[in-house]
Image: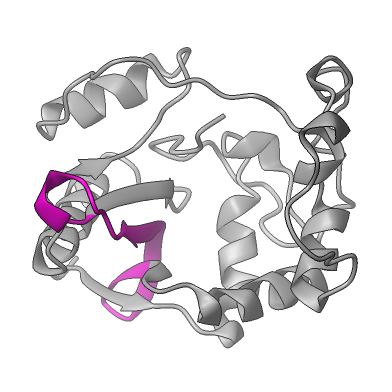
Amino acid sequence: MSDLTLRAITEADLPALIALYAQPSFNKGRVITLDAAKAIFARFAAYPDYAIYFAEADGETVGTFALMIIDNIAHWGTPTAMIENVVIREGLQGRGLGSAMMNAACALAQAKGAYKATLSSNLANERGHAFYEALGFEKHGFSFRLELGEGASPSSSLSRATGEGRGEGLPSLASFDPSVACQQDPHPTSPASGRGEGAVPSLIDGAAS
């Protein structure tokens, strides 16, 4: 394949993106509907510097990642970069595409002024850990997460995208019960989209889960 090129996706690319996300090793193949994806994608326009990118070679999409540049008052005002949702298309593993895509992602982050790039990877994803370390990433501290129940569900994301349920001010601290939040399944199984059937695990599971 020829050299990779990167481009930020548009709404028209969402079906192809969902197909990549439907690969079994990525978030266990769970995806949202195209309509929900369109509503969420529309919200990205309000984000200062966040985009989902396709890596392309010879006119075809070979992988994807999301990149957020986070402005920072600390560290002398130098922004940081967060890389998420790294996926290589089925059947294209082992060709160096993952390395090329991650190198391009880091170069893009550097060009945007970020002083560091961070990502997270499931503790069980030892293959992914070795991959990232080979690229120069270092294990640094611990990553913690707390499932927030309904707040992380696709339906609530769609409500935020459409402006529903948007109240005034911040929620009361008393309104959050972590014991309840941790007992709920924040990722209900979505109906199959019909795309990406027969997909095999991606080279890297870049999900934070």
- Give above or below for 93 relative to 67: above
- Percent position of residue 205, x then y: 46, 35
- Residue 63 covered by magenta stretch: yes
For the point 27% across and 46% down, which residue is it? 98
- Give above or below for 177 relative to 169: above
- Give above or below for 208 relative to 96: above
For the C terminus, the quadrant is top right
- Give above or below for 140 relative to 86: above
Drawn side of residue 83 relative to residue 170, left or right: left
Question: Which one is in front, 71 or 73?
Answer: 73
Q: Give the range drawn in magenta.
A: 54-79
Drawn side of residue 34 relative to residue 16, left or right: right
Q: Can residue 33 be seen in this view?
A: no
For the point 83% across and 67% down, which residue is it? 166
In the figure, residue 33 lies in which quadrant? Answer: bottom right
Question: Which one is in front, 91 or 6?
Answer: 6
For the point 12% across and 64% down, which residue is it? 113
- Percent position of residue 127, x then y: 34, 20
- Percent position of residue 50, x then y: 41, 68
In the figure, residue 165 lies in which quadrant? Answer: bottom right
